[in-house]
Amino acid sequence: MTEPAAAYEELKAAGLKLDLTRGKPSSEQLDLSNALLGLPGVGEYRSADGTDTRNYGGLLGLPELREIFAPSLQVPVGQLVAWNNSSLELMHDVLVHALLSPVPGAPARWADAGRVAFIAPVPGYDRHYGVCERLGIDLVTVGMTADGPDMDEVERLVADDPSIKGIWCVPKYSNPDGVVYSDEVVRRLASMPTAAPDFRIMWDNAYAVHHLTSDELEIADLLTLAADAGNPDRPFVFGSTSKITLAGAGVAFFGGSEANVDWWLKLTSKKSIGPDKVNHLRQAMFLTDAAGLRAHMAAHRELIAPKFAAVERLLAEAFADTEGVSWTTPKGGYFVSLTVPDGLASEIVRLAKEAGVVLTPAGATHPYGKDPQDAIIRLAPTLPPLDEVEKAMAGVVTCVQLALSRR
Ligand code: PMP
């Protein structure tokens, strides 16, 4: 038996049961926000302006919470909505609204527009693709560069084809490759001519404050750049506290131009009398202000940076000199993207699963679950304890080595 094959047999015999699939916070990270479970506290229900948060109403959400998040999401407080717990739900609903009611500047609602397509920079986030697949919105892929989507390609596509109505962007510490969009990419997105007058940028700033190093990166202000370029309605901005406080009981945000926010409020008033403002109040009491948010994220960083360091160390020890194997070293976010020689990703994921290490299915980083190169594996190290991340990554290394040896 070859050395890699023997190592793999040994790995299988260890009977591991480890999971690096989804970008969830660990229970230690959730513990950082345990104080929320006691907030706002008995008798505490008035917001700063005296609103009784227990009651209906207030579609925009509590101002004090919106004030905390306006700087990091780069949206003026008056144009930032705080909603319920999921930004994915907001993204889904915004696209449903756009299909059923014309977005500002649209000649027709998208349901009557014939084909509707979105650009999907790849690799990207599988749930973005899932929303489009569910709603019948076609996905057109473009490659990612170290600075963001390949803008030559994006500009070429949107200039000619009015059926291309939007693009998905995770502009900071992107899922899965940790890319931070350069100022030039943001400027080009804001100002590029589009054949569709109702083109939208789905600006999913899910990792706006999720730094893994002391180099807390900032990105250019899309909303201002778009307005300056004469395209004020182009951005739809999203964010949430899912990976800041409690993933299942946080607050999601939606922002954009005044016209976009009015459009959203009018349509949303048909489905809700208002968001969970008691949750807004307790989140605002807990985080206190932008500085409190920053300090809280530093505590997250302390818990998860060692896990990313372990992934980096184990990959570097094994593959520093291996042609065709590379990986990202993100400065924030929740993922590491491992690239292996073409055709090997699904085999490695299969080998790992057989050995008890569950990885995100190969192809999940691409629309329709198909990575044409079969080369990218998304690693999510935040959830398991550090020693399990190390064991799982040692297992991944063994599987990559076996797959390489069989080529
Ligand atoms: N956007 C991105 C890029 C994500 O990675 C995630 C979570 N994995 C989400 C959105 C989901 O956000 P929420 O919990 O607010 O629905």
Image (cartoon, rainbow, N blue to C red):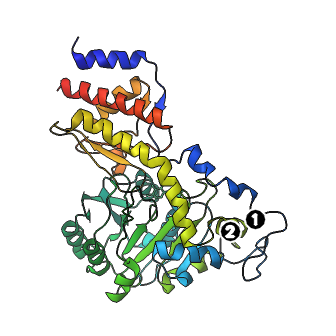
> What residue lies at 47% left-to-right and 72% top-to-bottom?
73
Vertical comparison of 296 with 110: above or below = above
Question: Viewer-proximal residue, 129 or 7?
Answer: 7
- Relative to 3, is 97 on the left or the right? right
Q: Tell me how far mark 1 sits from mark 2, CA to CA.
A: 7 Å
As helix, strand or loop, the secondary structure at mark 2 comes to helix
Tell me the residue that label 1 is attached to: 40
Vertical comparison of 148 with 351: above or below = below
As helix, strand or loop, the secondary structure at mark 1 comes to loop
The answer to whether one can see residue 73 in this image is: yes
- Residue neighbourhood size for the residue with mark 1, other residues' Cα within 10 Å, grouped as few (<14), some (14–19), many (≥20): many
> What residue lies at 65% left-to-right and 74% top-to-bottom?
270
The answer to whether one can see residue 89 in this image is: no
Vertical comparison of 256 with 296: above or below = below
- Residue neighbourhood size for the residue with mark 2, other residues' Cα within 10 Å, grouped as few (<14), some (14–19), many (≥20): some
> What residue lies at 25% left-to-right and 41% top-to-bottom?
375
Residue 366: give x, y in percent of width and height: 33, 50
Q: Are marks 1 and 2 in contact (CB under 8 Å)?
A: yes
**Amino acid beneath label 1:** Pro
Residue 74: give x, y in percent of width and height: 45, 76
Q: Quadrant of the C terminus?
A: top left
Residue 394: give x, y in percent of width and height: 35, 29
Q: Quadrant of the N terminus?
A: top left
Vertical comparison of 324 with 331: above or below = above
Tell me the residue that label 2 is attached to: 285
> What residue lies at 46% left-to-right and 23% top-to-bottom?
16
| Disc nearer the start of the sequence (1/2) | 1
The answer to whether the residue bearing label 1 lies less than 8 angstroms from the nearest atom of ligand 1 is no
